[in-house]
Image (cartoon, grey):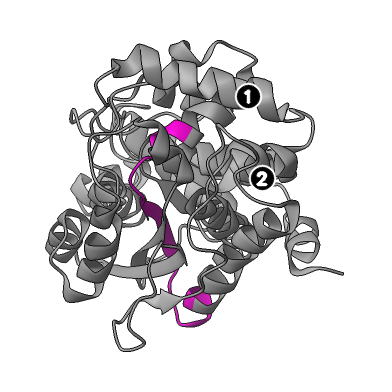
Amino acid sequence: MSLLQQTIEQITATTKANYDKAENYIDSLAKPPKSLGKLERIAAKLAAIHDGEFPKIHKKEVIVCAGDHGVCDEGVTTNPQSVTVFQTLGFPKGTTGVCALAKSVGAEVVAVDVGVLEDLPADSGVILKKVKYGTDNMAKGPAMSRDEAIRSIEVGIEVATQQIKNGVNLLATGEMGIGNTTPSAAILSVLEDCDPLEVTGFGAGVGEGGIAYKAEVIRKAIALNQPNRDDIIDVLAKVGGLEIGAMAGVTLAAAANRVPLVVDGYISTVAALIAAELNPHVQDYVLASHASEEPGAKIAAARLDIEPMLHMNMRLGEGSGAVLAFPIIEAALSMATTMVTLEQAASIIQPKV
């Protein structure tokens, strides 16, 4: 059995009984029921993941998957692909946006080369798992082969599984890949059966043709490659990205190991959608961090039935929004494990007889 199939079969649903148990306990705390809003739902979801118990977060980490995109040849972005290389090399040095934010919340950042155009130095600190040197131009043919798509997912599974073995029990997905909002929009357009313009945004900077041209490139790629919306591996192979596949693998591994997974923005949410297409129970383990400025992000989150915690007008990617959600998750758990119940509070103030 392949690693991918084994991981898919390992994922089981959380139970409503465990969620309800946690929710009822939270309702009994010394506060008006539901007065802490989303914090209560977050804590209950984490308890459901952990068989009804509120977990303690020991180690939190964002896995940043990096890859380049052949569709950049179509002029869908103003940014040069060289940005992917030097930003990927910046993660182990702690110099990128997500690293600065992760440092402030006590989280670690791990970078993985799944498909960067250039070879990275062996001593770069990046985990080297290159499947190929960037995707092919999906406007001219499939972005990758089916085997490469599967391998990209398995890279994410391998890396996340190892990090979980190393003690990580709160994960987030992040990405680096100039042009990667284009395949993300293409994947979501296929899954939603909608016009690409509905899910296409500015990304890291659109080319001269603007968003309308970017959507037309996606339209052309879908018409040419005819991805089968009932076969998510086919969709990933034909109009996807290597780092998107790897993030889907990270998401699958988290669910298989019953570890909560925080998605960042548009691209990592689309990656979680891929994972959920492979096993719908994945969404039981996924939390949304922030409402990305990309128009497709809201549609993707709704499809996963997850509700962002924050709205910070962010669209950087890298996992930057996801790490901001880490302290909110820890606050939710602290609420559930530190507050006394209303009954306990009443007993404290009752006079001794």
Secondary structure at numbered mark 1: helix
Is residue 70 a member of the stretch shown in magenta? no
Can residue 20 be seen by looking at this rendering?
A: no
Does residue 114 appear to the left or right of 9 in the view shown?
Answer: left
Q: Quadrant of residue 141?
A: top right
Residue 168 magenta: yes
Residue 41: % across, % down: 43, 36
Lower position in the chain sequence, tag 2 or tag 1? 1
- Residue at 55% over, 10% down: 195
The kind of residue on which mark 1 rests is: Ile
The magenta stretch spans which residues? 163-182
Pointer 2: what residue?
237
- Determine the secondary structure under disc 2: helix
Q: Determine the image quadrant of residue 86.
A: bottom left
- Mark 1 — residue? 222
Dot 1: few (<14), some (14–19), or many (≥20) neighbours within 10 Å?
many
User: Could you tell me the amino acid type at mark 2?
Assistant: Ala
- Residue occupying the point 51% across, 24% down: 218
Position of 281 relative to 124 (above/below): above
Query: Could you classify mark 2 by the number of other residues whose Cα lies within 10 Å: few (under 14), some (14-19), or many (20 or more)?
Result: many
- Disc marking residue 152: none
- Note whether 267 is above or below 211 in the view shown: below
> Do the residues bearing badges 2 and 1 touch, measured as CB atoms within 8 Å?
no
Residue 296 position in % (x across, y down): 43, 22
